[in-house]
Image: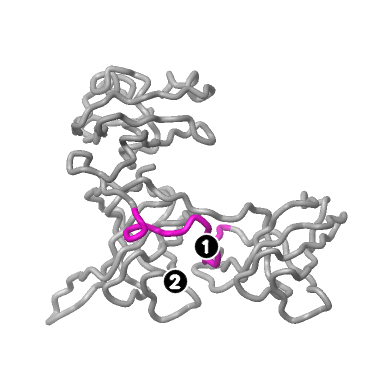
């Protein structure tokens, strides 16, 4: 929206109107989120609530006639929106709105049974668009494998922007998914204790498996995942496939992660949930059977890491994933 510069630069906190109803608005020629917000909420400045509630809108300046927009309603007590990092809006529930979802709210509450249950991502696999910049070139006492509390040497220093006190994530290359992209497994974190011009000494302060020379490193904070407040079910044609299972296993199941060929520029984000299906052929007829459910925890380029929150059958490469629930924060 062209008229939003003032709020993106401010720390303004806006409270949504109190209403228990949700609506669907069919876009007409000349409509803008700015004007639609005033129509439903009585306030132009609440347009980000509609934007956040319609995951297919990539650019809030661009909405088109005949599109159907979900107009979120709010439980008694309302909700609030705030400015997030990078000028992005996020919904935050007020005291009353944080209670379990009622039938009128149209949203399924998140809990430890239907959502990713951890704040920190420990060992995980992800597809990186580019190989991590740095390499482990030696280990403490030249041991073949080292772990928590041990020291390593990295082939970069201040000349490449690596400084004392930086945290690096340590990766082991697992498998290639296409010519220029590979799966990397997070094996731990290290802190730079002495940065030279061309090399640096680092201490491994958290390891999930052994670290060896040749492993890769990149400057990064510890990876975390934000738990959604809840989910809104949608009818979506956004789909893809499972392309990699942890440790290159043949099967996977609830509690493990997989790699799927879903990512940007599709309108998906961390926290979104997907139903998982398998293609079956019986008597020449191809059908699909539900086998589980997964939740995106990392979205990198055209591939994402999905945590399996449920599995009625073993998950396999080639299984279909289809967006079914949008995470709401």
Does dot 2 land on a helix, a strand or a loop?
A: strand
Q: Which residue is mark 1?
A: 127
Q: Residue sitting at 23 percent across and 30 percent down?
A: 65
Q: Residues within 10 Å of mark 1 (few under 14, many from 20)?
A: many
Residue extent of the magenta highlight: 111-129
Asked if one can make out residue 301 in the rendered structure from this viewpoint, the answer is: no
> Closest to the observer: 146 or 184?
146
Does residue 169 appear left or right of residue 277 in this picture?
right
Q: State the CA–CA distance, disc 2 to disc 1.
A: 10 Å
Q: Is residue 197 above or below residue 137?
A: above
Q: Is residue 312 above or below residue 275?
A: below
What is the quadrant of residue 142 in the picture?
Answer: bottom right
Residue 82, horizontal then vertical, whole percent: 45, 30
Q: Is residue 124 magenta?
A: yes
Asked if one can make out residue 245 in the rendered structure from this viewpoint, the answer is: yes
Marker disc for residue 244 = 2
């Amino acid at each position: 929206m062209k008229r939003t510069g003032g709020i993106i630069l401010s720390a303004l906190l806006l409270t949504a109107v109190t209403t228990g109803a949700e609506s669907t608005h069919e876009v007409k020629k000349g409509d803008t989120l700015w004007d639609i917000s005033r129509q439903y909420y009585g306030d132009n400045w609440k347009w980000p609530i509609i934007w956040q509630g319609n995951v297919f809108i990539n650019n809030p300046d661009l909405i088109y006639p005949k599109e159907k927009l979900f107009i979120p309603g709010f439980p008694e007590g309302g909700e609030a929106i705030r400015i997030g990092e990078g000028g992005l809006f996020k919904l935050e529930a007020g005291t009353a709105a944080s209670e379990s979802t009622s039938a009128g709210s149209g949203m399924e509450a998140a809990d430890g049974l239907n959502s990713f249950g951890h704040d920190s991502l420990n060992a995980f696999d992800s597809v990186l668009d580019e190989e991590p910049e740095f390499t482990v070139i030696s280990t403490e006492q030249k041991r073949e494998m080292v772990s928590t509390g041990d020291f390593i040497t990295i082939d970069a220093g201040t000349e490449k922007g690596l400084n004392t006190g930086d945290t690096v994530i340590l990766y082991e290359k697992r498998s290639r998914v296409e010519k220029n992209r590979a799966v990397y497994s997070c094996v731990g974190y290290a802190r730079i204790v002495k940065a030279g011009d061309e090399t640096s000494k680092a201490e491994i302060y958290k390891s999930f498996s052994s670290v060896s020379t040749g492993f890769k490193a990149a400057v990064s904070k510890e990876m975390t995942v934000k738990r959604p407040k809840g989910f809104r079910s949608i009818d979506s044609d956004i789909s893809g496939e499972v392309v990699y299972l942890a440790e290159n296993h043949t099967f996977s199941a609830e509690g493990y992660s997989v790699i799927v060929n879903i990512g940007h520029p599709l309108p998906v984000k961390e926290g979104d949930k997907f139903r998982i299906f398998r293609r079956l052929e019986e008597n020449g007829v191809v059908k699909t059977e539900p086998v589980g459910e997964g939740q995106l925890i990392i979205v990198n380029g055209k591939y994402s890491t999905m945590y399996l929150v449920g599995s009625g059958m073993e998950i396999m490469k080639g299984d279909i994933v289809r967006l079914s629930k949008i995470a709401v924060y």
